[in-house]
Image: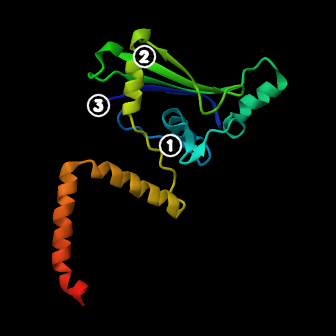
Amino acid sequence: MKLIKKVEIKYFRSIYNGVLKNVNDLNVVFGRNDSGKSNILRALNLFFNYQTNPELLFDFDRDFSYHRKGEADKNANVKKYVSVKITFVTPKKYPSLGKEFSVRRGWSIEGRPLDPREIITGVDKKYFSSVTRFLNSLSFHYIPAIKDRKIFESMLEEMYLVLSKDSKFSSSLATFSSELRSRTGTLTDS
């Protein structure tokens, strides 16, 4: 099911003004090293989890586009902010939200980075609580290149939490554990 139609990122790290149109269920982003591919994922992580990397909160000085900063240094009227806007295709479960709607989250140098300004478009104000419920039902996991044991352990923990909620998986684990215990009984006794 297509959930996201478009992603717009402004002034985040190496991304000055990026737009991903016609987003599909599977998207391939490719390019040279240090061309900004990971920053797209970090921007999505910022939108959904208010973090740029796992356990790394947004920091305006680090995460504000260096190109935009250069413009702002030359002209005091240039606004300093970071924004991520996502246009969603409304799931059938939320008919009051129309065919599609957008949510833009923005962080400014004057604002508190953990409390982004949020703008919802394409939805009547009386249904904003449905947008919030919809967003809270989503789960986004940014998995950076595995460089250390901590990230790997965190991934395993997340997978376990998701799988443990599935009753079929839990019952299959019980059968597996029982069979493993039975076959390794002699080893355990010795």
Residue plotted at (16% across, 64% down) = 175
Q: CA distance from mark 2 to mark 3?
A: 23 Å
Give the structural element (helix, strand or loop) at label 3: loop
In the picture of the structure, the residue carrying the numbered disc 1 is 30
Residue plotted at (44% across, 44% down) = 141
Q: CA distance from mark 2 to mark 1?
A: 36 Å
Please indicate whether residue 190 sits to the left or right of residue 134 in the image: left
Q: CA distance from mark 1 to mark 3?
A: 23 Å
Residue 181 in the image: above or below residue 173: below
Residue 29: give x, y in percent of width and height: 48, 40
- Label 1 close to label 3 by CB (< 8 Å): no
Give the structural element (helix, strand or loop) at label 2: helix
Residue 125: give x, y in percent of width and height: 44, 10
- As drawn, the label of residue 1 is 3
Q: Quadrant of the C terminus?
A: bottom left
Residue farthest along the right direction in this orientation: 74
Please indicate whether residue 2 sits to the left or right of residue 173 in the image: right
**Of the pair 105 and 182, the residue shown nearer to us:** 182
In the picture of the structure, the residue carrying the numbered disc 2 is 128
Mark 2 vs 1, N-terminal side: 1
| Disc 3 residue type (three-letter) | Met
Residue 153: give x, y in percent of width and height: 45, 60
Residue 88, quarter of picture: top left
